[in-house]
Amino acid sequence: MTVTQATTVANLRDLGGTPLTGGRTVRAGLVLRSGQLDRLDLEADRAVAALGLRTVVDFRTDIERGEHPDRIPAGARLLIADALADKINADSSGGADTPGKIPAAQLKEMLSDPVVAEEHLGGGKVQALFASVYRSLVSSASAQAAYRLLLTELADPQAGPLLFHCTAGKDRTGWGATVILSLLGADDETLMSEYLSVNPAVRIAFAPMIEGFTAAGGDPDIALALIGVFPSYLEAALDEVNTRYGSMETYVREGLGISDATVEALRARLIA
């Protein structure tokens, strides 16, 4: 896996080079992940320009896209795949500790008031909230549609270099990377390593937000639980896969509706 030293895109990583079983690796330059592209400047950021992106898959909500619209390279396609639409609608209509509040999608808002954050997210609530979000990334119809689109596009040789992202590039994007790498043959240790590897980048990107929150009296553990990723978050999604489908391949085929032919095409294209 390669970290691209971009100056206008946060947390940009090429999954190329990730080790797979049998001594194989992921082919470089075809599948990349990142945070949002609202500050993308190809003239100033030659590292990104050199990638030759042709397809961008945006997992963000309507609100996120409206507040920070992507800047897309000329000639690239932008595909919208709101992975959290069903989760937000469900939480807004009843009973959640923080109705309509999705930590992955509303970091700034959730760290704006330390008192409110403590009430809704303290005492382990933030970890429970993330577990619920990650389970929804497996089971909700909107998430299944989003990841179906991602895998279908990646299997298409006409898609060119593809980048998928959310806001911070850690949760919705992290699950997408896990699904892809699992299908390609990465082992459990590699999957977790890739998932956790974004922590330094996202903590740097959101450092001012964390500092402001803690300076106002906020609990730094809450801030870190919101900003970073932890094994328990990914484990919640993997447990949802095992409980509902028994295996990642069955989840992909039955939950996402991806055909065997598409899976084989994806492997042929991305395994070096």
Image: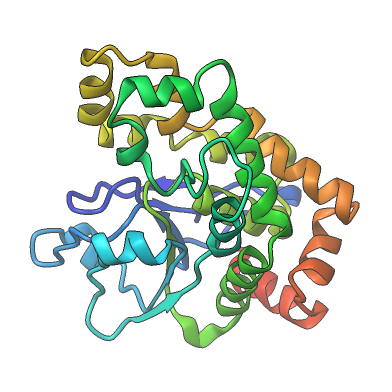
Residue 9 vs 202, above or below: the answer is below
Q: Is residue 32 above or below residue 134?
A: below
The quadrant in which the C terminus is found is bottom right
Structure colour scheme: rainbow
The picture places residue 207, in percent across and down from the top left corner, at 25, 28
Residue drawn at x 31%, y 50% is 4
The x and y percentages for residue 71 are 22, 69
Question: Is 151 positioned to the left or the right of 223 in the image?
Answer: right
> What is the quadrant of residue 255 in the picture?
bottom right
Residue nearest the observer in this picture, 102 or 252: 102
Looking at this view, name the residue that lies furthest to the left: 44
Pick whichever, 138 or 88, lies toward us.
88
Residue at (28, 24) in percent of width and height: 210
Q: Residue at x 56, y 60 (%)?
A: 89
Q: Is residue 56 visible?
A: yes
Q: Is residue 68 visible?
A: no
The spot of residue 184 in percent (x, y) is: 69, 59
- In this rendering, position of residue 156 left or right of residue 239: left
Quick one: 39 or 190, which is closer to the camera?
39
Which residue is pictured at 33% across the width and 31% down the height?
111
| 77 up-or-down from 151: above or below | below
> In the image, 226: left or right of 91?
left
The outermost residue toward the right is 246
